[in-house]
């Protein structure tokens, strides 16, 4: 290393254009397998010329990347302040928990449902809100929650 | 009641409002035509003269920010901040889902003004519909010749792409967003250098919020003088206020900056549910200090809210009635910031967890007066001692909550 070379060791091996694709690559890998398995992280790292440890570190920074499988239906109840003020958040999480028999943070034994409390979904004007997979549900009441859950149970 | 014909939200309730044809039927992309006939310097001067300040929370003068971009740099970038995550805020999501072209027109004009040929839209990973709407809007704009090479035969080229975040509030901070766009952990960078000097991949980068960009077309088409005639001395133009919590008609209300908080809550948002009294209001999103009802006449503007001891932030107004448990409100807001700490600084990462533990003890009714002292001590050991403002923001609800609602905290720990 000469006097003008101040780059950290190994930095020159990373291609910035490839690293910029990392979040997209992780989304693709996660969509394919449901979560980021060790193999998926290895594969992404190899394709983008990164170290698997580095990829895991970056993935772990972001809430939407998961290294554990989730249920077929991932129910995410907004835990934000506005939802709490509008009788949502814990009340809705507890209501759903009692209905499907799954505690927040857990997945049902049959792998059908996961229940989570998540940060503000930007639905404060239509609170209380929750999301199931890619679908957002707003202005929730016990009756609408019942209807939504019944719909899921019928779909199986 | 302030009478105001919406400008920023004029399109959102039209049928198929997100389509480029709907947008163009109502004057869409006319401002772009006008802007491309102006010099970049004249455009920057116009935005400066309008008095527009950033709508993402910090309120920095937009024209000044554009002026910071070096003229001679060969590569410059524009980054569009759609990472709306401040609890209580739901305006950017509405504009992106219902009127994405109003933002995109501002993106193209801003890029032309600063001489950027590449723009990156960074959007919150949870905004599934917003991602689709952004992608469709960009694809249609290419088709109509508003993006790509030689836009409207002006000789100006611009490419835009969409990048999903993946669940990290801190990525709404501009340098953390740049890190995330580069495919890294979203940890904020040291400022200075500011992104205008050293931004994305080391190049000068302008980062702008969605609502800020949605204002640009109106400044260009109606002129800076018109824009500057709206609002207060230091806060110009219309603003989308997000009203939520214990009000009869929660929702987004576009009004001139300077509209009194009381008017927004009681006349536009229909007043407090069941006619109850107000106990507290958060005026600008979860990171802004709580206001008590004696401050309800404050005009919703940057300078007046600062004088009242809070901040305009994102303009997200959360209303809490007399039945609200303020200890729980404090705990809940703190829990958000603790979850969203990037973990870079010890006071925020570990201090935050200790702060939340102490609040949980107090909130559960098992605490003692010593726990309140501990909370204040912890807040002093975090506030101002972290790399980015997150640490200070995390302590704000605790210190202002205990100060304003001391009797509720005292009662919870059995002190009189």
Image (spheres, rainbow, N blue to C red):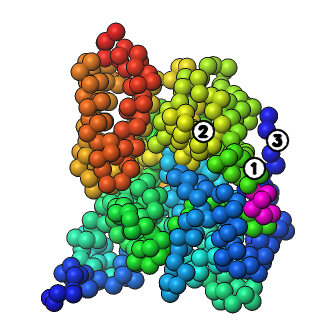
| Residue A48 against residue B205 in the figure, above or below | below
- Distance, label 1 to label 2, CA atoms, is 16 Å
> Which residue, given by chain and number where applicable, does mark 2 sit on?
B304
Task: Report the chain holding disc 3.
Answer: B
At mark 2, the secondary structure is: helix
The answer to whether residue A91 is seen in the rendering is yes
Image location of residue B407, percent across then percent down: 41, 16
Residue A48 picture quarter: bottom left
In-front residue for pair A43/B175: B175
Residue depicted at 26% across the width and 35% down the height: B378
Closest to the observer, B239 or A54: B239
Q: Name the residue under label 3.
A: B3
**Secondary-structure class at tag 1:** loop
Residue B338 in sight: no
Which of the marked residues, 1 or 2, is nearer the chain's N terminus? 1
The magenta segment is B222-227
Query: Badge 2 sits on which subunit?
Result: B
Residue at point 82%, 49% (across, down) = B5
Query: Which quadrant does the N terminus of chain B fall into?
Result: top right
Q: What is the secondary structure assignment of the residue under circle 3?
A: loop
Task: Name the residue beneath numbered marker 1.
Answer: B230
């Amino acid at each position: 290393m000469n006097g003008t070379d101040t780059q950290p060791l190994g930095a020159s091996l990373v291609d910035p254009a490839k690293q910029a694709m990392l979040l997209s690559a992780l989304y693709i890998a996660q969509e394919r397998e449901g979560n980021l398995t060790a193999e998926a992280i290895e594969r992404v790292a190899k394709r983008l010329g990164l170290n698997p440890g580095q990829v895991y570190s970056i993935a772990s920074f972001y809430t939407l990347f998961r290294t554990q499988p989730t249920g077929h239906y991932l129910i995410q109840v907004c835990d934000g302040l506005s939802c709490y003020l509008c009788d949502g958040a814990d009340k809705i999480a507890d209501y759903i928990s009692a209905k499907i028999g799954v505690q927040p943070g857990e997945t049902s034994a049959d792998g059908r449902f996961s229940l989570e409390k998540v940060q503000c979904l930007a639905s404060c004007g239509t609170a209380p809100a929750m999301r199931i997979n890619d679908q957002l549900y707003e202005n929730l009441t016990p009756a609408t929650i019942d209807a939504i859950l019944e719909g899921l149970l019928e779909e199986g | 009641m302030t009478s105001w014909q919406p400008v920023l939200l004029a399109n959102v309730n039209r049928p198929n409002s997100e389509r480029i044809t709907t947008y163009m039927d109502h004057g869409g992309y006319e401002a772009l035509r006008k802007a491309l006939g102006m010099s970049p310097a004249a455009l920057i001067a116009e935005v400066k003269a309008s008095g527009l300040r950033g709508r993402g929370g910090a309120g920095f003068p937009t024209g000044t920010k554009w002026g910071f971009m070096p003229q001679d740099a060969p590569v410059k970038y524009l980054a569009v901040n759609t990472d709306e995550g401040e609890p209580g805020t739901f305006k950017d999501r509405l504009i992106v889902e219902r009127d994405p072209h109003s933002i995109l027109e501002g993106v193209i004009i801003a890029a032309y003004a600063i001489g950027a040929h590449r723009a990156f839209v960074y959007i919150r990973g949870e905004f599934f519909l917003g991602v689709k709407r952004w992608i469709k809007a960009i694809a249609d704009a290419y088709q109509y010749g508003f993006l790509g090479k030689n836009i409207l035969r002006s000789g100006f080229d611009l490419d835009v792409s969409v990048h999903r975040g993946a669940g990290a509030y801190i990525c709404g901070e501009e340098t953390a967003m740049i890190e995330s766009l580069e495919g890294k952990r979203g940890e904020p960078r040291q400022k200075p250098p500011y992104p205008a000097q050293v931004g994305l991949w080391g190049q000068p980068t302008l980062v702008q919020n969605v609502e800020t960009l949605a204002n640009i077309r109106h400044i260009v088409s109606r002129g800076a003088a018109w824009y500057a005639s709206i609002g207060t001395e230091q806060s110009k133009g219309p603003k989308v206020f997000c009203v939520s919590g214990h009000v009869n008609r929660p929702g987004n209300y576009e009004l001139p900056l300077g509209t009194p908080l009381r008017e927004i809550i009681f006349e536009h948002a229909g007043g407090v549910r069941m006619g109850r009294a107000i106990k507290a209001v958060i005026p600008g999103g979860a990171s802004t200090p709580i206001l008590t009802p004696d401050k309800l006449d404050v005009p919703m503007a940057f300078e007046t809210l600062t004088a009242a001891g809070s901040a305009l932030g994102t303009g997200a107004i959360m209303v809490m009635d007399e039945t609200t448990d303020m200890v729980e409100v404090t705990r809940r807001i703190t829990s958000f910031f603790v979850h969203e700490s990037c973990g870079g600084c010890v006071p925020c990462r570990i201090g935050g967890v200790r702060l939340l533990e102490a609040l949980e003890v107090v909130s559960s009714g098992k605490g003692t007066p010593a726990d309140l002292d501990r909370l204040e001590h912890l807040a002093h050991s975090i506030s101002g001692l972290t790399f980015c403002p997150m640490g200070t923001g995390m302590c704000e609800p605790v210190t202002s909550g205990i100060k304003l609602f001391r009797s509720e905290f005292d009662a919870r720990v059995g002190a009189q």
